[in-house]
Amino acid sequence: MGQDANLIRIDGLSEATLRALMTRAEAFIKGAPAANIPKDACVSTLFFEPSTRTKLSFQRAAQRLGVDMLSFDVANSSTRKGETALDTFRNIEAMGVDVFVVRHHEDGAVDALVAHANKGTRFVNAGDGRSNHPTQALLDMMTLQQNKGQDFTQLRVAIVGDVKHSRVARSDYQALALLGVQDIRVCGPTQLLPAADDMPRAQLMDRLDDALDGVDVVMTLRLQRERMEEGLVDSLENYHANFGISEARLARAAADAIVMHPGPMNRGVEIEDAVADGPQSRILQQVRNGVYARAAVLERALRGTCD
Ligand code: CP
């Protein structure tokens, strides 16, 4: 019991486990009840970074499973008095929490907590640094499957934006590769592209029109505004002109291409309103899937096994 039921990263998962989580999430959409969750089970969020979608959808998922959930509010917590993340975790763990859902700005922060946890305490990574956002990848793969079917091998997928600094892009890439996607195009300004060995199966591209040519799926990423302060992007206007998804740009993709975005969106920067709210957008479908994807992940963690 314990480690096997954690979800820290997509890397290292088997395709069978990823597909089993997707199947379970789909069953929850159809109204399946939770199974074999211990009585009095308790989940706690432990978010040291802001979140709207991830945190609330985990809360909704816990309600759906009928388990208690504590919600840690960093802004009003004793971290303001200097308490460390590790001490914060240990104190909440001592209250009898079974599963922690953790978000932290540092890469590897969740692994560090795992190393200090009691036997039997389980973890779900809700985003660490630039590294991993596995439940976002799970809900994104569900959204792809709902729109494009179970066979991922023929899909052409473009991931567009600040890929280098994106934990969503990293986890999505790993999930796409695991599910057999052959044509993964990663596009952005050269300075925001990942190292080639970070995403070895992807084609790295710096021309959006080439990246969108004939694709079935456009995964757009939020441009983090601190990239301007770091001098990595000269202006939002230029970024939009070169890498923003507009209706005209989207016309280069397949006629039935879908557009995804993990949120929060910078409307008018990486995506235009007409696309974000248009017929090819699946952005709110992603959000809806998040509740069920996270219910599947929490159920697995609470049961303490990966079967
Ligand atoms: N997609 C995502 O992680 O959104 P939040 O930061 O609002 O949780």
Image: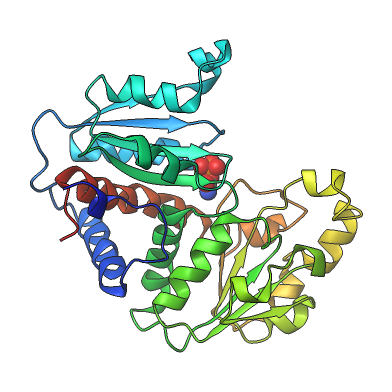
Residue that sits furthest to the top in the current view: 81
Of the pair 123 and 38, the residue shown nearer to us: 123
Left or right placement of residue 96 versus residue 6 in this view: left
Quadrant of res 244: bottom right
> Is residue 281 something that shows in the picture?
no
Of the pair 60 and 8, the residue shown nearer to us: 8
Check the image and report above or below for 70 versus 103.
Answer: above
Left or right placement of residue 131 versus residue 247 in this view: left
Q: Could you say where residue 124 lies in the image, as x and y percent from the top left?
A: 36, 45
Which quadrant does the C terminus fall into? bottom left
Quadrant of res 60: top left
Residue at 41% in and 67% down: 141
Q: Could you say where residue 26 lies in the image, as x and y percent from the top left?
A: 26, 61
Q: How many marks?
A: 0
Residue at 65% in and 49% down: 265
Residue at 45% in and 60% down: 137
How is this picture coloured? Answer: rainbow
Check the image and report above or below for 76 versus 113.
Answer: above
Check the image and report above or below for 39 versus 197.
Answer: above
Residue at 79% in and 75% down: 206
Q: Could you say where residue 99 lies in the image, as x and y percent from the top left?
A: 27, 37
Q: Could you say where residue 300 lies in the image, as x and y percent from the top left?
A: 21, 51
